Amino acid sequence: MQGRPTLADVAARVGMSQAAVSLALNNKPGSRLSEDAVERIHAVARELGYRPNWAARSLRLGRTGTYGFISDAVTVTRFASAMIRGVLDVVEARDDGLLIAETDEHPRQLSKALDVMIDRNVDGIVFAAMAARRVDLPGLPGSLRCVTANCLSPQVPAAVLPAEAEAGYRLARVLLDAGHRDGIVVLGHAPRAIADERISVTIADRFAGINRAFKEAGVRPAAVVNIWPWEPDRGYESARSVLSTTPLTALLCLNDRLALGAYQAVAESGREIPGDVSVASFDDEELAAYLRPGLTTAALPYRAIGARAMRLLMGEESATGPVHLE
């Protein structure tokens, strides 16, 4: 055999029609072939070195079967990498391909990644961010399908975000339903982040949910401590201060990193968690799993966000505005 093996060569070797061989190789239903026959077709294809002609396939179908995923730091962050797994769940189920690029928030890298994917005729691109914020994207071709995941962009109407208002409400209710009333301290109020969408487009929703729960219960927090950024050392310092000045029974931390610092401060104060002080937080970072006693934390649905964004991109689902996932 000379030249590149074709579908006809595989069909001739196994003694079946090209249509049946195509269905088997593409894992499509309807071939009515036995498992042994399908395995024999794949074995012959491997033996001959048969590879589909994707250029011809894309011309025939009007799509390349390849998508793009561009993010700032999602792929190198364990905290958010589940988003990629969600994207891949959908892509792999369709036997399509995915190109991944990381920009580290550099505009030049973003433009380069976009150009590379457009040059390769991807069928669409998911733009993602580790922190839910507003992102500015370079000029996008009008024909290019795009969706943002865990971020918003004025250039892209379709977006998938975590349902932070519901998360804030539910976590506050956990403490309220456990009997905490006058002694809840909110650790991590962030007026700067609430006011600036380039920092966050969801923190305001998180606080709105918390405040709704308090209002329904007729409760006012014992204190609301402003902290930014949300890092362990700031959580430690703020918790240490409030523990010495405010009668409290619970700390509602706005993320796990603040909670980590709060755990240290509670231990130093001679009190115990949860006997003396309950602690709850958001994000369900990996570090939360190592805290003892275990931390009550609300997980961000990164995997579901990635999967939903890809289904929107592929047209399997539709939405008229941003989708919020619990």
Image (cartoon, grey):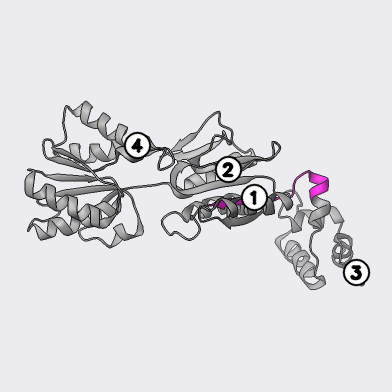
Residue designated by label 3: 3
Is residue 68 shown to the viewer in this render?
Answer: yes
* Position in image of residue 151 (x %, y %): 48, 42
Q: Residues within 10 Å of mark 4 (few under 14, many from 20)?
A: some
User: Which residue is drawn at the image coordinates 34% and 52% (left, top)?
Assistant: 284
Please tell me the numbered disc located at residue 194.
Answer: 4
Q: Which residues are magenta?
A: 58-71
Label 3 vs label 1: CA separation? 34 Å
Is residue 304 shown in magenta?
no
For this view, does 13 lie left or right of residue 228? right
Circle 2: residue type? Leu
Label whose residue precedes the other's in the sequence (3 or 1): 3
Label 2 near label 1: C-beta < 8 Å? yes
Vertical arrangement, residue 281 with respect to residue 220, above or below: below
Is-magenta flag for residue 60? Answer: yes
Q: What is the CA distance from the residue labelled 4 to the residue labelled 3?
A: 62 Å
Q: Which residue is mark 1?
A: 114
Outermost residue on the front side: it is 108
Q: What is the C-alpha distance between the residues marked 3 and 2? A: 44 Å
Image quadrant containing the C terminus: top left
- Disc marking residue 137: 2
Amino acid bearing label 3: Gly
Q: Earlier in the sequence, mark 1 or mark 2?
A: 1
